[in-house]
Each structure stands twice: as C-alpha cells, then as structure tokens.
Amino acid sequence: MKREHVLAALVAVLGVAVAVLLGVVVFRAPARPHARVVASRTSADALPSRAANPAASRGGTLKVGYDVRNRWPGGFTVELVVTNLGGSPVEGWTVRLRLPPDITVARAWSADVSQVNGVVNLRSQPWNAYLAPGGVVRLGFEATGNPTVPTSCTVNDSPC
C-alpha cells in the first residue's frame, strides 16, 4: 500500500513538471510576424533612418554601419552592422553598396553576396534574417582594391 502511494505521488509530480515545461515552451515563444518591414534609409556613416511610410515608421527602422577593419597591399576587409532601431521586427534585409569599379568582393560572411558592375548586394541568410527591435547583425566582406567607403548605400531598396 505504501509503495502505491509513493508511485502515485511520483506520477503526480512528473505530470505537473511536464505541464509546467509545456506551458513555458508554448507561452514564452516569441511571436515572429511574417510581414516584412521596409526601412527607407541607411547610411555608410551609421546615421539612423526614417521609414518611407507611416505604417513602416512604427517599427523596422534600420541603420547600417560600414567600417574598413583591415588593410593590406591590394585588399581590405569591411565589417557592416545592421541595427533595427524601430519598435517592430524586420524579417529579411538586403544591403546594397555602390563601390568603385576597381573593387572586387572576394568573399563575405553572415550574408549571401553578389556583385555586378560595382554594386554589391549582401542579403540576409535564413539564420540571421529576423531582426527584433534593437536587434543587431554583424556581417562583412573581403575585397581586392583600394579601401574606400561606398558612394551609395541602401537597405531593403530604400535610398540613403
């Protein structure tokens, strides 16, 4: 009889523990809206932006910092920092930089990169596409040529 009471108490405790864990998982999971918020302005000198329309201005304001981190004869590396200054999350981002024609991007990290006619496109990857309010993603690239700042910069197709 005593053994049955102990087993019943153990089953009850385990049931409560499972219910608590399930509740924590279900109710603490952050909501991730599927809407894409587009910022209207970024800057190579890391100035904050303002959204293009009133709906977007309530969140998803992005800024981009551009920093030449390393230099050597014939090449350099750049670190970019994309920050969500808004009150709403941003789902997906693309940074577009116009660089002089003598600069060629060899490789990038934390972004998918393409370059055509001096325009470098750096796109979010599945693991870093979601930017919560206040969220930051760091990315960068290695390039050949003389280090310089871009002549233009956009994020999510909005001009600087």
Image (cartoon, helix red, strand yellow):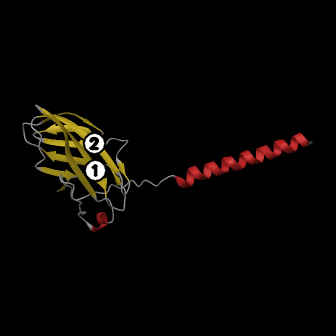
Q: Nearer the viewer, residue 156 or 100?
A: 100
Q: Residue 82 appears at what percent x and percent y?
A: 28, 50
Task: Report x, y in % for residue 55.
Answer: 31, 66
Tag 1: amino acid: Val
In the image, taking residue 22 as reference, residue 32 lies left or right, namely left
Q: Is residue 160 left or right of residue 34?
A: left
Residue of label 1: 82
Please name the residue shown 22% across and 38% down the image: 141
Distance Cα–Cα, label 1 vs label 2: 8 Å
122 relative to 42, above or below: above
Specify the quadrant of the image occupied by residue 125. top left
- x and y percentages locating residue 36 in the rendered image: 33, 54
- Does 110 sit above or below residue 159? above
Q: Which residue is mark 2?
A: 139
Q: Which image quarter holds the N terminus? A: top right
Is 55 or 30 nearer to us in this picture? Answer: 30
Q: Earlier in the sequence, mark 1 or mark 2?
A: 1
Q: Quadrant of the C terminus?
A: bottom left
Please report the residue visible at 22 percent of the width from the left and 47 percent of the height from the top: 95
